[in-house]
Amino acid sequence: KMEVDFVTLVCVGVGVLQVPLLMDILDNAFPQLGIGRATRAGLSKVLFALLSGFCLVALYYFFTTFLPLYVERPFERPLGLAHIVCAVWMWVNAVGHYILASSVSPGIAPRADDSTPSDAKTCRKCAAVKGPLVHHCNACGYCVRAMDHHCPFTMNCVGLRNFFHYFLFLAYGSSGLIYGSVLSWRPFYLCWIADGADCPLRSTASLLFMPAFFICLSGLGLLAFHVLLLLTNMTTVDCLVCLRNSSVSTLVAAMRDTATRPDSKLRTLLLVGRPAWHWLVPVVDRRYPVREPIPMPLPTTGGSGDEGAAATSAATSGVGAAATLGEGPTPETAKTK
């Protein structure tokens, strides 16, 4: 009975973690229904709590269950200390960058004012100055600079200021899940695939390989997707809008164009310009405040405010980040032409 309950819990947990992907698929396949937008807000807090709990459970089982299977008295032996240092380093970075991706402002686009050129495009929902890499987020209620997507797991947009933390969260999280899958494979194999005579764990902990492995596949898929986008100087918004409005062949052509243009600097803006040790330890970039003042919604007349058109233009014409955000990720470069 206990084993059946545990397997059910594992299946439910892994299934809930796939809900955002299902919502995005439904949003893009049936945009007129608005299924994803209607459910994403309520699920965000559940997903945030679930992922945070998974991180704590993973560290607990590492020290209490799996590490003693490979090294006796791990705190007294070099091999055990090496395992502990490696696991804790990946865990601290994954959790630290997850917290920063959730708490650091994504980079709110400035609202149009008297100094804004008269021919500048503005958002009809928040009156922010628009550009090829500035998109309005309906979940947050404001325009985000270099917006990639709104992440339900972090309950925050991923943009200019926190993409670095989001990307490293995926990298360290996937590395930790690979490490955990390798450690949990042996007891899972001996207890459930082999005859069970040599099973080292007479408990349901031997089943933990399954959630670790399936969540690892999801993390690696997201990481590979964002690496591809960085190599082609595109964002998730650009990719999805291009797919929705055209075809896969058009998207491939747009990726090839944006990847080879000399003025495409999206990956430079998002990842470069930080000290090298920021890649090894989760810290806040001193150039950016953690939070920015959020502008109140301001109804405007005129202006385009159409993030779809802007994203399509960026995806199909290869307009680089430099045209919108300047040469570096500084707060002063937010204004567009």
Image: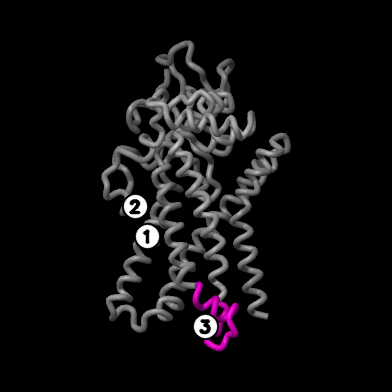
Q: Amino acid at mark 3?
A: Leu
Outermost residue, bottom direction?
197
User: Is residue 270 placed above or below 86 in the rendered structure?
Assistant: above
Tell me if 109 is positioned left or right of 300 in this view.
left
Do residues under tags 1 and 2 come within 8 Å of each other at their CB atoms? yes
Q: Residues within 10 Å of mark 2 (few under 14, many from 20)?
A: many
| Badge number at residue 92 | 1
Query: For the point 43% across and 72% down, which residue is it?
Result: 62
Badge 3 is on which residue?
A: 201
Query: Which of 260 and 272 lies nearest the eye of the viewer?
Result: 260
In percent of width and height, residue 322 lies at 38, 26
Q: Amino acid at mark 2?
A: Pro
| Badge number at residue 282 | 2
Query: Which of 159 and 298 lies nearest the eye of the viewer?
Result: 159
Number of numbered discs visible in the structure rendering:
3
Magenta stretch: includes residue 110: no
Q: Nearer the viewer, mark 3 or mark 1?
A: 3
Asked if residue 278 shows in the view, the reply is yes
Magenta range is 185-204
Q: Nearer the viewer, mark 2 or mark 3?
A: 3
Q: Residues within 10 Å of mark 1 (few under 14, many from 20)?
A: some
User: Is residue 179 placed above or below 331 in the rendered structure?
Assistant: below
In percent of width and height, residue 177 lies at 47, 62
The answer to which of marks 1 and 2 sits earlier in the sequence is 1
SS at badge 1: helix
Q: Quadrant of the N terminus?
A: bottom right
Query: For the point 59% across and 78% down, which residue is it?
Result: 193
Query: Which of 188 and 13 lies nearest the eye of the viewer?
Result: 188
SS at badge 2: loop
Q: Amino acid at mark 1?
A: Val
